[in-house]
Amino acid sequence: MQRQLFKTGNSIVLSLPKELLDSLGLKNGENVSVELDKPNNRLVISPVEKPLAASLDEDFAKQVNDFIEKYRPALEELAK
């Protein structure tokens, strides 16, 4: 796949096609790691692993919050 670099402000930008981003599970605004593979004269772009909390789906997070609210007194007693 061949891409063209272009200038935006003081930066040079490499756009990536949606199909490639989708195959890596990347979305706009997410972080990637960019490394230089000098022996092979290549750039290596990899997804940055998301922290567990960021990768939880909203439904599961809501269930956890509901559980904590429902059992807060018992959880606080156990924490003593």
Image: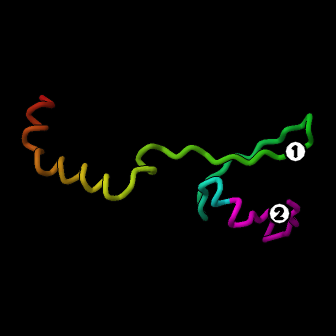
On the rendered image, what quadrant is the C terminus found in? top left
Badge 2 density bin: few <14, some 14–19, many ≥20, Cα 10 Å = few
Q: Amino acid at mark 1?
A: Arg
The residue at which mark 2 appears reads as 12
Q: Position of residue 41 (x, y in %)?
A: 92, 42
Q: Position of residue 38 (x, y in %)?
A: 89, 37
Q: Position of residue 2 (x, y in %)?
A: 88, 62
Does the segment drawn in magenta span residue 73?
Answer: no
Point 86% across, 64% down: residue: 3
On the rendered image, what quadrant is the N terminus found in? bottom right
Circle on res. 3:
none
Identify the secondary structure beneath mark 1: strand
33 relative to 76 in the view: left or right: right
Identify the secondary structure beneath mark 2: strand
Quadrant location of residue 21? Answer: bottom right
Q: Position of residue 12 (x, y in %)?
A: 83, 63
66 relative to 61 in the view: left or right: left
Which range of residues does the magenta coloring cover?
Answer: 1-20
Quadrant location of residue 59? Answer: bottom left
Asked if residue 50 is positioned above or below residue 37 in the image, the reply reads below
Circle on res. 42:
1
Distance between the Cα atoms at labels 1 and 2?
A: 17 Å
Asked if residue 64 is positioned above or below residue 37 in the image, the reply reads below
Specify which label sits upstream in the sequence, 1 or 2: 2
75 relative to 23 in the view: left or right: left
Badge 1 density bin: few <14, some 14–19, many ≥20, Cα 10 Å = few
